[in-house]
Image: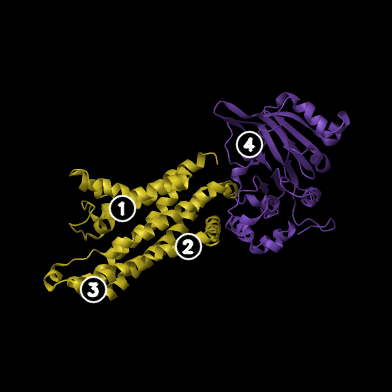
Chain colours: A purple, B yellow
């Protein structure tokens, strides 16, 4: 279901993700350290940071999978865990491998959809939207990583949510898939959705995102428009390298 | 309430959409074939025995013997219902889309419990039917008694099967690993009763009385002295112990699940 610009939106998609002094510890280690930022609707917000910076942990905290030590993450002003049918408000892709290989793509999506009162027709619709309609009845075990990414994106879209979060969705996609996902992210944002896109690929971010949040060692490093960063530095990659230089934990000397 | 029904529908789709479910149900029901084979063997031995020996010949209740097969199968089904989600990471998606979490366990309990009961009853009543057909009035009419007299025991043995399914689910959710959960289940069926059978009285009888294998007979009050288990519990207490095997791990994991990081 691709909504054309001329179609009036059938409901208001306006959504906001807000983090207020979010902190998460694992033992003595601070995975997320007093992190505050806000993600607004209508554009793609890129979420960047070195390995181990706390990006995935932050997404898990927003989704209520982990409990924060202090602070809070709010979606449209409410904690995620208070949502009764969350798929209609938030869609998330955390790990494309998180599927049962013995189940068909269609059945995988159907069992997710049913929990939030979403019908089988919508499952068929999102399978078409991500280009998996032809393999919907095939078992997921035989899918490539790129196909699993598409399936994960389909799952996130099931509830037609206003807020979408994707963790490294470009991994494993072929050039055609990368271009497709870039277009999809932009069109979803153009529909007024709020999109948080975590990735290591700064060049891809430069093409897709309008705003950037960079974290390092669990702390906020920068929150800015891509245009501001590319004006101050030769490229987004250079900006990223300069800003995260002090917070890289796992890397070769540079 | 509606939310719980939705999760129930989802869990039923999960169960029926993987091949291993069908395999394990067929394997569980195949206990009837084992029962049939044992009955044919017993009938042959009985017919070959001299008349004097026939008079004193006894036969074990074959439903009780073969029920170990659906018990183990459904224990594995229950375990897999949750550990396969932990192994693949699907559990994070499941918990994300149902943030209250407990409806997932409640729904899984319902579907694996129901499938366990159907599988168990099919295996137990099927074994009774074929054994009765094969044995006829052999073994002093062990299998020619009124069906109604036998019914309570058959029901109690059948119910032990979904108990294994729920025990597997609870242990799987607690340990998040199928290896650990299945090891405990196999231990409960085979290893621990064997150990208990060899410890000194009165502990052998006492501990034997709370083994799952002992409970159906204690529930129906239909105890026999030749049992490898004990028979100390009155029916109500035995029923409570059987329910505890199913409920305690599930309750523990429901309480833990609320706070555990996924």
Q: Give the Cα distance between marks 3 and 1.
A: 26 Å
**Discs 4, 3 touching: Cβ within 8 Å:** no
Asked if badges 3 and 1 are on one and the same chain, I answer yes
Q: Residues within 10 Å of mark 1 (few under 14, many from 20)?
A: many
Q: Which residue is mark 3?
A: B146
Left or right: B217 in relation to A121: left
Q: Give the Cα distance between marks 2 and 3.
A: 34 Å
Asked if badges 4 and 3 are on one and the same chain, I answer no
Q: Quadrant of residue B2?
A: bottom right
Q: Which residue is mark 1?
A: B212
Locate residue B37, reporting x and y percent: 32, 69
For marks 3 and 1, the one nearer the N-term is 3
Q: Which residue is mark 4?
A: A57
- Check disc 2 and report its element: helix, strand or loop: helix
Q: Give the Cα distance between marks 4 and 3.
A: 64 Å
Locate residue A101, reporting x and y percent: 59, 54
Left or right: B185 in relation to A25: left
Left or right: B211 in relation to A195: left
Q: Which residue is mark 2?
A: B23
The residue mark sitting in front, 2 or 1, is 2
Q: Give the Cα distance between marks 2 and 1.
A: 25 Å
Image quadrant in which the N terminus of chain A is located = bottom right
Q: Quadrant of residue A165?
A: top right
């Amino acid at each position: 279901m691709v909504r054309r610009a001329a179609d009036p939106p059938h409901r208001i998609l306006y959504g906001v993700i807000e983090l207020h002094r979010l902190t998460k510890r694992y033992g003595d280690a601070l995975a997320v350290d007093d992190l505050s930022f806000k993600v607004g609707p209508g554009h793609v917000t890129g979420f960047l940071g070195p390995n181990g910076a706390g990006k995935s942990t932050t997404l898990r905290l927003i989704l209520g999978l982990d409990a924060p030590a202090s602070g809070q993450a709010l979606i449209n002003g409410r904690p995620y865990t208070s949502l009764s049918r969350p798929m209609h408000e938030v869609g998330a892709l955390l790990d494309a491998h998180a599927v049962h290989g013995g189940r068909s793509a269609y059945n995988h999506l159907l069992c997710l959809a049913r929990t939030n009162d979403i019908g089988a027709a919508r499952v068929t619709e999102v399978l078409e939207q991500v280009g998996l309609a032809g393999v919907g009845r095939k078992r997921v075990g035989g899918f490539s990583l790129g196909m699993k990414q598409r399936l994960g994106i389909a799952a996130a879209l099931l509830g037609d949510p206003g807020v979408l979060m994707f963790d490294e969705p470009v991994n494993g996609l072929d050039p055609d898939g990368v271009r497709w996902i870039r277009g999809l992210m932009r069109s979803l944002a153009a529909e007024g959705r709020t999109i948080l896109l975590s990735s290591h690929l700064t060049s891809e971010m430069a093409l897709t995102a309008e705003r950037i949040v960079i974290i390092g060692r669990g702390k906020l490093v920068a929150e800015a428009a891509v245009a501001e960063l590319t004006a101050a530095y030769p490229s987004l990659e250079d900006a990223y390298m300069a800003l995260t230089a002090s917070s890289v934990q796992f890397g070769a000397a540079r | 309430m509606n939310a719980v029904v939705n999760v129930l529908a989802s869990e039923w789709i999960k169960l029926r959409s993987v091949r291993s479910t069908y395999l394990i149900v067929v394997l569980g029901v195949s206990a009837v074939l084992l029962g049939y084979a044992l009955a044919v063997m017993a009938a042959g031995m009985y017919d070959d025995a001299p008349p004097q020996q026939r008079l004193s010949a006894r036969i074990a209740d074959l439903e009780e013997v073969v029920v170990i097969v659906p018990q183990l199968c459904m224990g594995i089904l229950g375990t897999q219902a949750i550990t396969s989600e932990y192994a693949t990471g699907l559990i994070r998606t499941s918990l994300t889309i149902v943030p209250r979490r407990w409806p997932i366990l409640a729904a899984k309990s319902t579907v694996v419990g129901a499938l366990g009961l159907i599988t168990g009853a099919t295996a137990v009543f099927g074994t009774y039917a074929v054994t009765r057909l094969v044995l006829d009035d052999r073994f002093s009419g062990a299998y020619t008694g009124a069906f109604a007299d036998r019914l309570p025991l058959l029901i109690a043995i059948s119910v032990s099967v979904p108990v294994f399914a729920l025990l597997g689910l609870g242990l799987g959710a607690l340990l998040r690993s199928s290896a650990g959960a299945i090891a405990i289940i196999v231990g409960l069926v085979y290893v621990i009763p064997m150990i208990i059978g060899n410890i000194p009285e009165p502990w052998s009888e006492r501990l034997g009385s709370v083994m799952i294998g002992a409970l159906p007979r204690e529930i129906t009050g239909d105890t026999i002295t030749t049992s490898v288990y004990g028979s100390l519990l009155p029916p109500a207490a035995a029923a409570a112990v059987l329910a505890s095997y199913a409920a305690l791990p599930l309750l523990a994991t429901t309480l833990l699940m609320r706070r555990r990081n996924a």
